[in-house]
Image (tube, rainbow, N blue to C red):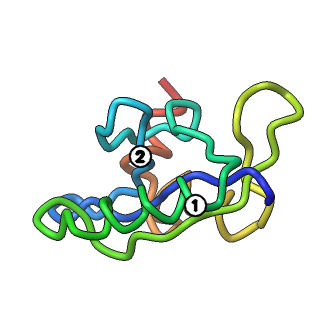
């Protein structure tokens, strides 16, 4: 199994979020829990999907872990983590500070 993290969009803000080891939704990929066991990942995915009052669009995302921190393997996921591209706000603005 490829290393994976659980990702979704926060229901209220729409921000991309990742499930942390503590079960909280984190806005930074570096805080995401990385799963290498398929059964455990599917179990946590089912539990995260049931949290419909917090997030929408929950799914498993492949990551690379060679650097020690999870990195997106697909350009779509790399793009998602930086936030909306139509305006300079949110995560994009925060990265400039």
Considering the numbered disc 1 on the image, is that residue within a helix, a strand or a loop? helix
Residue 34 is situated, as x and y percent measured from the top left of the image, at 62, 41
The image quarter containing residue 13 is bottom left
Does 3 appear above or below 65?
Answer: below
**Residue drawn at point x = 77 percent, y = 66 percent:** 74
Label at residue 6: none
- Disc 2 crowd rating (10 Å Cα; few below 14, some 14-19, many 20+) is many
Residue 9 is situated, as x and y percent measured from the top left of the image, at 35, 64
Residue 42 is situated, as x and y percent measured from the top left of the image, at 51, 65
Kindly report the distance in space between the C-alpha atoms of the residues bearing marks 1 and 2.
16 Å
Callouts 1 and 2 close, C-beta under 8 Å = no
Label at residue 39: 1
Residue 34 located left or right of residue 44: right
Q: How many marks?
A: 2
Viewport quadrant of the N terminus: bottom right
Front label number (1 vs 2): 1
Outermost residue, bottom side:
57
The disc, 1 or 2, on the residue closer to the chain's N-terminal end is 2
**Residue drawn at point x = 58 percent, y = 32 percent:** 30
- Disc 1 crowd rating (10 Å Cα; few below 14, some 14-19, many 20+) is few
The residue singled out by tag 2 in the image is 19
**Residue drawn at point x = 31 percent, y = 69 percent:** 49
Does 78 appear above or below 31?
Answer: below
Outermost residue, right side:
66
Front residue of 71/38: it is 38
Considering the numbered disc 2 on the image, is that residue within a helix, a strand or a loop? strand
Residue 78 located left or right of residue 92: right
Front residue of 45/19: it is 45
Residue 45 is situated, as x and y percent measured from the top left of the image, at 43, 63
């Amino acid at each position: 199994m490829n290393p994976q993290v659980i990702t979704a969009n926060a229901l209220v803000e729409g921000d991309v979020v990742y499930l942390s080891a503590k079960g909280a939704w984190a806005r930074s990929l570096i805080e995401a829990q990385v799963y290498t066991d398929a059964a455990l990942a599917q179990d946590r995915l089912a539990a995260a999907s049931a949290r419909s009052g917090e997030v929408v669009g929950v799914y498993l995302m492949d990551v690379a872990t060679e650097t020690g921190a999870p990195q997106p393997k697909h350009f779509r996921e790399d793009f998602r983590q930086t936030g909306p591209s139509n305006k300079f706000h949110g995560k994009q603005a925060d990265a400039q500070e």
